[in-house]
Amino acid sequence: MEYEQRKSRLFFLVTTVISFYLIFYFKDHTTDIKRDHGWYTEPYVAPLFGLGILAFFSLIKLMLVIKPIEGEKGLVESFLDSLSDYRMVFITAVLFFSYVNIITIVGFTISTTLFVLAIVWLSRLFSPIWALNTIIAVASIILIFRVGVNIWIPDVALYEMLFSGQTLWFMNKYL
């Protein structure tokens, strides 16, 4: 394997370790919700599935690039060199971290719309049709999960400051 393909081995090592850590300790970071809809409506199912895929493929990639080549750079130097190749990964990770932490502050609808629009913009899809598709996708997600499956997110701090009574109930329920 060429050196250029192998220079990111520390990146895959870090990704593998973090994803396995999150898989093994997901119960510490999530809560069970008592519902009669089944296990598939638990809040940890989708992230656990995604982390499993990430751990599997990063482990495979790590095994392919872990054998050292004589005279090549160390792991830390290789990692620092490969950061520029993975800047979009880090930008997306920061956006996702921000998105997850801002949901309870500004609400699912606003935060998801902004997050998806940012991802679409980073993908260089600048036409108005993609913004329309984002709004349609967010509206569909709300209809499917909030109305159809009856999955709710905790009340939003911004809504509680701005609204009261029936308006607050409507905003927390649908937006």
Image (cartoon, grey):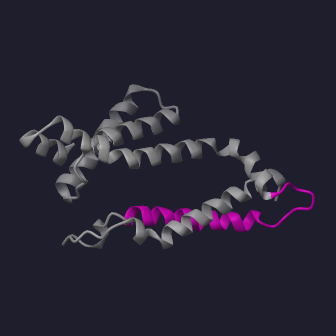
Q: Residue furthest left?
A: 166
The residue positioned 34% from the left and 38% from the top of the image is 113
**Number of residue marks:** 0
The residue range painted magenta reads 45-74
Residue in the foreground of this view, choosing between 73 and 36: 73
Please indicate, yes or no, whether residue 85 appears anywhere in the rendered image: yes
Q: Is residue 71 left or right of residue 121?
A: right
In the image, is residue 33 above or below residue 6?
A: below
Please indicate, yes or no, whether residue 57 appears anywhere in the rendered image: no
Please say whether residue 98 is one of the residues in the magenta stretch.
Answer: no
In the image, is residue 152 above or below residue 121?
A: below
Please say whether residue 53 is one of the residues in the magenta stretch.
Answer: yes
The residue positioned 31% from the left and 67% from the top of the image is 42
In the image, is residue 164 above or below residue 21?
A: above
Q: Residue furthest front?
A: 161
Q: Position of residue 130 (x, y in %)?
A: 40, 33
Q: Quadrant of the N terminus?
A: bottom right
The residue positioned 83% from the left and 55% from the top of the image is 2
Residue in the foreground of this view, choosing between 111 and 122: 111
Q: Is residue 167 left or right of residue 128?
A: left
The residue positioned 93% from the left and 57% from the top of the image is 71
Q: Quadrant of the C terminus?
A: top left
Q: Position of residue 100 (x, y in %)?
A: 39, 49
Q: Quadrant of residue 132?
A: top left
Q: Position of residue 77 (x, y in %)?
A: 80, 51
Q: Quadrant of residue 98?
A: top left
Q: Is residue 104 left or right of residue 7?
A: left
